[in-house]
């Protein structure tokens, strides 16, 4: 099952935003992001999955920023995030850390507003064909987000030996694992 994204111009923005940090077709992290969003939907929380391919940004460069300003895509993504309360980062592990796509996107976002993410409660997940499931990368994301002053959920979801089935779902991912991961955002949602 795939979570249905609300229309892009919906007047009511979901409080949960899921960002897979891979734009690759056949990405196991995109599949995991969809499965996490579906679980939020099941628990009654409308959720948006953001495809970073729809928000292309050049590699951050101060001279480029001075010349052209911040990309409109960064401004638009920042606007979308201001209305969210929970951010789920689902990043592949590249050489022991998260992807340059994710870092570059966040760097540009903070040039729109340095506190653009400050209000978000962050959950971190990863999927990898490897045996570690990208857990080292999730640790780096958690540390990085904490360094930026964000609140980060203690539990990570790292899906090891990740492969897709014919329905673009991750094989062998137990629904109870998803539910436990997603439930970390529940106290925040109840308080709202
Ligand atoms: C440059 C690069 C570095 C990688 N380093 C790791 C790594 O450190 N640990 C790991 O588990 N997988 C690593 N991989 C394999 C990725 O987990 C695999 O390509 C995965 O499918 C990428 O995520 P995606 O399917 O969501 O695009 C690496 C892949 C690339 C391209």
Image (cartoon, grey):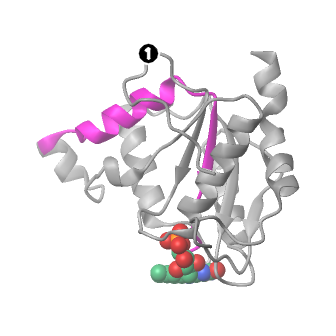
Which residue corresponds to the image point at 11% horizontal and 44% vertical from the top-left?
Answer: 67
Q: Quadrant of residue 10?
A: top left
Q: Position of residue 165 (x, y in %)?
A: 62, 73
- Residue at disc 1, secondary structure: loop
Would you say the beta carbon of the disc 1 residue lies within 8 angstroms of ligand 1?
no
Question: Which quarter shows the C terminus?
Answer: top right
Return the residue nearer the eye: 71 or 144. Answer: 71
Image location (x, y in percent) of residue 53:
34, 54
Quick one: which residue is furthest to the left in this view? 67
- Please provide percent x and percent y for residue 115: 51, 30
Q: Nearer the viewer, residue 105 or 173?
A: 173
Badge 1: residue crowd in 10 Å (few <14, some 14–19, many ≥20): few
Which residue has dot 1 on it? 11
Q: Is residue 154 visible?
A: no
Is 86 rendered above or below residue 148?
A: above
Q: Ligand 1 is located in which of the four quadrants?
A: bottom right
Is residue 136 placed above or below 4 in the rendered structure? Answer: below
Residue, far front? 166
Q: Residue at (74%, 84%) from the top-left corner?
A: 131
Residue at 83% x, 40% y is 183
Total labels: the figure holds 1
48 relative position to 154: left or right: left
Is residue 148 toward the left or the right of residue 171 in the image?
A: left
Residue 134 x %, y %:
67, 72
* Towards the viewer: 53 or 9: 9
Please give the range of residues in magenta: 68-95
Q: Residue at x 82, y 55 (%)?
A: 175
Question: Residue 130's quadrant in the figure?
Answer: bottom right
Residue 77 visible in image: yes
């Amino acid at each position: 099952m795939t979570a249905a994204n609300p229309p892009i111009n919906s007047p009511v923005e979901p409080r949960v935003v899921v960002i897979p940090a891979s734009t690759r077709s056949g990405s196991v992290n995109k599949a995991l992001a969809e499965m996490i969003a579906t679980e939020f939907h099941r628990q009654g929380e409308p959720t948006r999955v953001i495809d970073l391919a729809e928000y292309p940004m050049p590699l951050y460069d101060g001279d480029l920023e001075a010349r052209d300003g911040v990309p409109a895509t960064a401004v638009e993504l920042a606007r979308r995030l201001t209305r969210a309360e929970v951010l789920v980062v689902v990043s592949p592990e590249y050489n022991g850390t998260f992807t340059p796509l994710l870092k570059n996107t966040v760097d540009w976002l903070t040039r729109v507003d340095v506190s653009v993410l400050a209000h978000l409660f962050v959950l971190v997940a990863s999927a990898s064909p490897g045996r570690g499931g990208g857990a080292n990368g999730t640790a780096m994301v958690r540390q990085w987000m904490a360094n930026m002053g964000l609140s980060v959920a203690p539990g990570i979801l790292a899906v090891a030996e990740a492969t897709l089935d014919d329905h673009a779902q991750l094989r062998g991912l137990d629904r109870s694992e998803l539910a436990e991961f997603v439930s970390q955002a529940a106290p925040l949602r109840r308080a709202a």
